Image (spheres, rainbow, N blue to C red):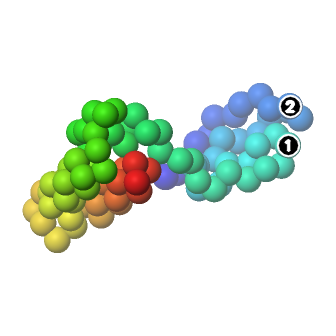
Amino acid sequence: MAVADERREGCDGEFPRANLEDVVLPDGVVVTEVAMRESRAREILDVGPAATEAEVRNAFFQQVKHAHPDRETGSRSAFKLVKEASDRLN
């Protein structure tokens, strides 16, 4: 992800917008990771809010088959996304 040239107003004046791997908040806190929302994880795995652990696991196995980077339909980023979704729901 490239660093954007846009500037935003912060508590101490302006600071450049950084990518998600290196976000520095006005109070000096560095955000290195943003957790995936549960609703987004369910959307990625195509399971409903009432899905059981077994249903989530089965959905993960189905999605990971398509997302694996060794397959034509997959990529490293898709695989990572499916894995993160599964981790979020387990």
Residue 77 in the figure: left or right of residue 19: left
Q: Look at the picture and state if 79 lies above or below 28.
A: below
Of 59 and 33, which appears nearest the observer?
A: 59
Of 26 and 53, which appears nearest the observer?
A: 53
Kind of element beneath mark 2:
loop
Tell me where residue 84 appears, x and y as whole percent: 40, 55
* Residue at 28% across, 39% down: 51
In this rendering, the count of numbered labels is 2
Tell me where residue 47 appears, x and y as whole percent: 25, 38
* Residue at 83% across, 49% down: 28
Q: Quadrant of the C terminus?
A: bottom left
* Residue at 17% across, 71% down: 70
The span from disc 1 to disc 2 (Cα, nearest Å) is 8 Å
Q: Look at the picture and state if 53 lies above or below 75.
A: above
Q: Are dots 1 and 2 in contact, CB under 8 Å? A: yes
Of 4 and 68, which appears nearest the observer?
A: 68
Callout 2, which amino acid? Cys
Residue 15 in the figure: left or right of residue 63: right
Dot 1 crowding, Cα within 10 Å, few <14, some 14–19, many 20+: few
Residue 2 in the figure: left or right of residue 68: right
The dot on residue 77 is none
Q: Which residue is mark 2?
A: 11
- Outermost residue on the top side: it is 9
Q: Which residue is mark 1?
A: 27
Upstream in the sequence, badge 1 or badge 2? Answer: 2
Dot 2 crowding, Cα within 10 Å, few <14, some 14–19, many 20+: few
Q: Nearer the viewer, mark 1 or mark 2?
A: 1
**Residue 28 visible from this viewpoint:** yes
Tell me where residue 50 appears, x and y as whole percent: 31, 34
* Residue at 79% across, 50% down: 29
